[in-house]
C-alpha cells in the first residue's frame, strides 16, 4: 500500500516569529536578534532625522561649534586689538607732529632764503699743491673742501667760493668718490691758477708765516688759502709763493682770540 506524500506547509501555515515589540522576525533570526536589528535601525533613523542642526540635548552642531570658536578667538584678541588701536593713534600723532615740524622748517627755510645776502668777497682755495700730497692726504683735502662748500651754502652771507688749479689727484678722487661735485652750485671750479683769472691787486694770501696781521676784511679782495694737507712737511710754502708772485699776504688774528701753543695753521675748512 502506497504511503501518502509528505505535506509541505504553506507560507501561510508557517509559524511567524514575532519580536517583543510585535515586529516579524526575519528568516533565520531569533526574536532577540531581530530586536537588536530593530534597535540599530531605529537609532540610525533617529540620528539621520536630527541632522547637523539638532543632535539632541547637550550635543553641539558644527555650525554652533564654529561660531563658538570665532567668538572665543575674538575675546582672546581683545587686548591685541586694543594695543593695535593705541599704536595707530600714536603713529597718527607722530605723523601730525612731523608735519608740523616740517611746515615750521619749510617756513624757516623760506624766511632764511629771503634773508640771505651773498657777499662780494671771494675766497679762493689754491689747489696747486697736488703733487706734494700723498693720495690719503688728497682724500682729506677733498673732505675739507666738501665741508667748506656745505657751510657756505648754509651761510646767511655766503662768499664767492673758488677752487683754482683743480685737477690731478684731487679731481680724480672727486670724480671717483664724490661725483655730485659737478652739480655744485654757488662755487667756481677752475682748472686755471688764481693769478690768471683774478686781478693781481685783489689777491691776498692768508698764511700763518706772514708777519702781517689781518684785522679787517675787504669785500673787494680775493683771499687765498692753501689747499694743502701736509702735516707741516712743507713749512712756509704758501708764504713763499705769495712772495714769488708779489701779492699781498697776511695771517688771521688768531692770537688775539685763541690761545695756541703750536703754529697757527688751520685746516682748509677752518680758515
Image (tube, helix red, strand yellow):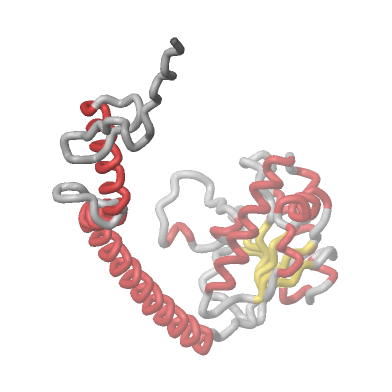
Outermost residue, top direction? 1
Is residue 238 in view?
A: no
Quick check: 120 left or right of 39? Answer: right
Query: Which residue does the image show at 56% across and 51% down from the upper left?
Result: 265
Q: Is residue 54 above or below residue 189?
A: above
- Residue 194 point in image, percent of width and height: 79, 67
Q: Quadrant of the N terminus?
A: top left
- Residue 162 point in image, percent of width and height: 71, 69
Query: Which residue does the image show at 42% across and 13% down from the upper left?
Result: 3
Nearest to the observer: residue 256 or residue 182: 182
Q: Quadrant of the C terminus?
A: bottom right
Nearest to the observer: residue 248 or residue 264: 264
Query: Which residue does the image show at 42% across and 61% down from the upper left?
Result: 256
Outermost residue, front direction? 1
Is residue 146 in view?
A: yes
Query: Which residue does the image show at 33% across and 37% down from the upper left?
Result: 12
- Residue 161 point in image, percent of width and height: 67, 71
Q: Is residue 80 above or below residue 198?
A: above
| Number of numbered discs visible in the structure rendering | 0
Outermost residue, bottom direction? 114
Nearest to the observer: residue 215 or residue 55: 55
Q: Write down the quadrant of residue 233 in the picture.
A: top right
Quick check: 210 left or right of 181? Answer: left
- Residue 202 point in image, percent of width and height: 72, 76
Q: Is residue 164 above or below residue 25?
A: below
Amino acid at each position: 500500500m502506497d504511503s501518502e506524500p509528505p505535506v509541505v506547509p504553506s507560507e501561510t501555515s508557517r509559524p511567524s516569529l514575532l519580536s517583543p515589540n510585535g515586529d516579524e522576525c526575519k528568516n533565520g533570526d531569533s526574536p532577540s536578534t531581530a530586536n537588536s536589528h530593530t534597535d540599530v535601525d531605529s537609532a540610525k533613523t533617529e540620528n539621520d532625522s536630527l541632522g547637523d542642526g539638532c543632535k539632541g540635548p547637550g550635543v553641539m552642531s558644527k555650525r554652533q561649534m564654529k561660531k563658538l570658536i570665532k567668538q572665543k578667538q575674538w575675546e582672546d584678541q581683545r587686548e591685541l586689538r586694543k594695543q593695535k588701536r593705541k599704536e595707530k593713534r600714536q603713529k597718527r600723532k607722530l605723523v601730525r607732529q612731523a608735519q608740523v615740524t616740517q611746515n615750521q622748517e619749510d617756513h624757516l627755510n623760506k624766511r632764511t632764503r629771503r634773508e640771505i645776502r651773498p657777499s662780494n668777497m671771494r675766497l679762493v682755495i689754491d689747489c696747486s699743491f697736488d703733487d706734494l700730497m700723498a693720495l690719503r692726504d688728497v682724500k682729506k683735502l677733498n673732505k675739507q673742501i666738501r665741508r667748506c662748500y656745505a657751510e657756505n651754502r648754509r651761510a646767511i652771507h655766503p662768499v664767492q667760493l673758488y677752487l683754482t688749479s683743480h685737477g690731478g689727484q684731487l679731481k680724480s678722487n672727486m670724480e671717483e668718490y664724490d661725483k655730485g661735485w659737478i652739480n655744485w652750485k654757488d662755487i667756481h671750479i677752475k682748472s686755471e691758477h688764481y693769478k690768471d683769472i683774478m686781478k693781481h691787486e685783489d689777491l691776498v694770501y692768508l698764511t700763518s708765516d706772514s708777519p702781517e696781521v689781518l684785522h679787517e676784511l675787504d669785500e673787494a679782495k680775493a683771499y687765498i688759502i692753501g689747499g694743502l694737507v701736509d702735516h707741516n712737511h712743507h713749512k712756509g710754502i704758501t708764504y713763499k709763493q705769495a712772495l714769488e708772485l708779489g701779492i699781498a699776504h697776511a695771517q688771521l688774528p688768531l692770537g688775539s682770540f685763541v690761545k695756541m701753543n703750536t703754529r697757527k695753521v688751520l685746516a682748509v675748512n677752518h680758515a
